[in-house]
Image (spheres, rainbow, N blue to C red):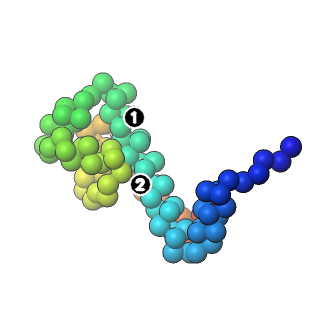
Amino acid sequence: MVKKKTRAQIFMEEQLKNQEVAESFHQGLEEMRLSVKIAQLREKRGLTQTQLAAMMHTSTPVISRLENGERCTLSTLKKVADALNAILKIDLIPKERLKKV
């Protein structure tokens, strides 16, 4: 049995046909993936946001913003990686290779 698409799914497919919308959508997904990884690794290390902030010489709200997907600088990401004993990996992916949603 084939499931019928919801209106939301149809709407999203239509919107993602626009290249600008698709790029923005995929950028947002990547930012959210990174913020989730930061929070998960912090928790795995047994750290609170306040403790991580202290290790990075920054404030707890900065960590909260990072974990909520707000944009940050490369410098901040390097500090997060160092504090969490992790490696920061940055990659360039050609836009034409982005998955279609």
Q: Element under label 2?
A: helix
Q: Residues within 10 Å of mark 2 (few under 14, many from 20)?
A: some
- Which residue is pictured at 19% across the width and 45% down the height? 61
Q: Quadrant of residue 48?
A: top left
Q: Is residue 1 above or below residue 30?
A: above
Q: Residue furthest top?
A: 46
Which quadrant of the rendered structure holds the C terminus? bottom right
Q: Is residue 94 visible from the viewing direction of this image?
A: no
Query: 95 left or right of 63?
Result: right
Which quadrant of the rendered structure holds the N terminus? top right
- Which residue is pictured at 14% across the width and 45% down the height? 58
Q: Is residue 33 above or below residue 46?
A: below
CA gap between label 2 and label 1 equals: 14 Å
Task: Write down the residue under mark 1.
Answer: 40
Q: Is residue 29 above or below residue 15?
A: above
Q: Quadrant of residue 96?
A: bottom right
Label drawn at residue 94: none
Task: Write down the residue under mark 2.
Answer: 31
Q: Is residue 66 above or below residue 40?
A: below
Q: Quadrant of residue 54?
A: top left
- Which residue is pictured at 27% across the width and 59% down the height? 73
Residue 80: percent from the left, percent from the top? 28, 44
Query: 35 left or right of 15?
Result: left
Residue 43: percent from the left, percent from the top? 34, 29
Residue 45: percent from the left, percent from the top? 33, 27
Q: Amino acid at mark 2?
A: Glu
